Image (cartoon, rainbow, N blue to C red):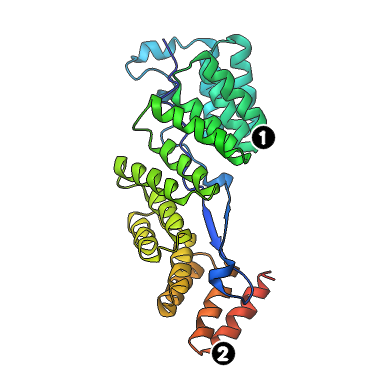
């Protein structure tokens, strides 16, 4: 009996990329990007006990899990519930029992990654790839850690290796696109996001990310189209409405910008930059009382 490794990936949903501008300057000049990985936005799509073992096993075979594999199953339950330290402890127990159990290193790598300990994550994924050089998921995981560590070239190399091993690996294309985006190589990012969309046409995150890349290329029409598609697919996030509103704003369509900023505020009443930018859109339309009200609200929420 084996534990699935390459196909048993922890899928990270919505690493939200924000475009924001603050103050009262020119939005086109103040556009900036930051990426935030919010731990409660990190989920595993199908991280069940059944996924830890071979799909073809019978109930009787499940009962015959080795002691090390049982520890991995326990670790996965903690990983899914966001208890990173407890997950690490279980994976460590599994490795103590069976030092050659590659998936235990893979999962421990993800747990360290989610804790923000990227160096340890890289070490774990490196061990996992050494034990199984065909484990696309571990190359992807190491790429995530390199990317968040700011080592974009190594991240791109690992995502590329994952794609070589699994040409339909949607997340590898998406995150390689993010790495290219961080390097300012927006055309290459768009190519990767487009490939991810070709593989999965319901990939709202890829549409959103491609919209960001188009925004940075000042291709506002395509950016708005992609944000709209992301909204249609769902789930809906305030940041998507905010960025579509920002793009309308930069394109001089202040009424649609106000509509999207308002929707973002409805979804997140503490969205200070949405208030600020809606105020600036009102200002452009000569609606100064509404603008002042929004500026005051933004300051009240802590925007300087």
Residue 172 percent coordinates (x, y):
43, 36
- Residue at (67%, 74%) from the top-left corner? 300
Residue 180 percent coordinates (x, y):
50, 44
- Residue at (50%, 26%) from the top-left corner? 138
Query: Foreground residue, 304 or 262?
Result: 304
Q: Residues within 10 Å of mark 1 (few under 14, many from 20)?
A: some
Task: Say whether residue 139 is left or right of residue 298.
Answer: left
Whether residue 126 is visible, yes or no, is yes
**The quarter of the displayed image where residue 52 is located:** top left
Task: Say whether residue 81 is left or right of residue 149.
Answer: left
Q: Secondary structure at mark 2?
A: helix
Query: Foreground residue, 29 or 76?
Result: 29
Residue 232 percent coordinates (x, y):
33, 58
Whether residue 270 is visible, yes or no, is no
Residue 254 percent coordinates (x, y):
44, 79
Residue 254 vs 188, above or below: the answer is below
* Residue 20 numbered mark, or none: none
* Residue 117 numbered mark, or none: 1
| Disc 2: which residue | 289
Residue 251 vs 51, above or below: the answer is below
- Residue at (63%, 19%) from the top-left corner? 92
Residue 185 vs 289, above or below: the answer is above
**The quarter of the displayed image where residue 31 is located:** bottom right
C-alpha distance separating marks 2 and 1: 48 Å
The quadrant of the rendering that contains the C terminus is: bottom right
Residue 238 vs 301, above or below: the answer is above
The earlier-in-sequence mark between 2 and 1 is 1
């Amino acid at each position: 009996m084996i534990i699935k490794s390459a196909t048993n990936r922890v899928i990270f949903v919505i690493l939200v990329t924000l475009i924001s501008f603050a103050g009262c300057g020119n939005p086109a000049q103040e556009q900036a990007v930051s990426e935030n990985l919010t731990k409660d936005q990190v989920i595993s799509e199908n991280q069940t006990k059944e996924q830890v073992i071979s799909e073809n096993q019978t109930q009787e075979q499940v009962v015959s899990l080795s002691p090390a594999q049982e520890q991995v199953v326990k670790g996965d339950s903690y990983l899914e519930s966001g208890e990173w330290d407890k997950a690490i402890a279980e994976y460590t127990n599994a490795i103590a029992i069976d030092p050659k159990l590659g998936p235990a290193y893979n999962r421990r790598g993800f747990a360290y990654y989610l804790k923000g300990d990227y160096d340890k994550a890289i070490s774990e994924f490196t061990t996992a790839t050494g034990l199984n050089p065909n484990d696309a998921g571990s190359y992807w995981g190491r790429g995530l850690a390199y990317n968040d560590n700011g080592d974009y070239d190594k991240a791109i190399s690992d995502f590329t290796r994952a794609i070589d091993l699994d040409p339909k690996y949607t997340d590898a294309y998406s995150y390689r696109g993010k790495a290219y985006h961080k390097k300012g190589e927006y055309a290459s990012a768009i190519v990767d996001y487009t490939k991810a969309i070709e593989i999965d046409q319901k990939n709202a995150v890829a549409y959103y990310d491609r919209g960001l890349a188009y925004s940075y290329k000042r291709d506002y029409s395509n950016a708005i189209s992609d944000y709209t598609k992301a909204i249609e697919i769902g789930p809906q996030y305030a940041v998507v409405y905010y960025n579509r509103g920002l793009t309308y704003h930069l394109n001089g369509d202040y009424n649609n910008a106000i509509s999207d900023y308002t929707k973002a505020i409805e979804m997140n009443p503490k969205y200070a930059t949405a208030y600020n930018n809606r105020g600036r859109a009102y200002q452009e339309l000569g609606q100064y009382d509404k603008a002042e009200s929004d500026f005051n609200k933004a300051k009240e929420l802590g925007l300087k």
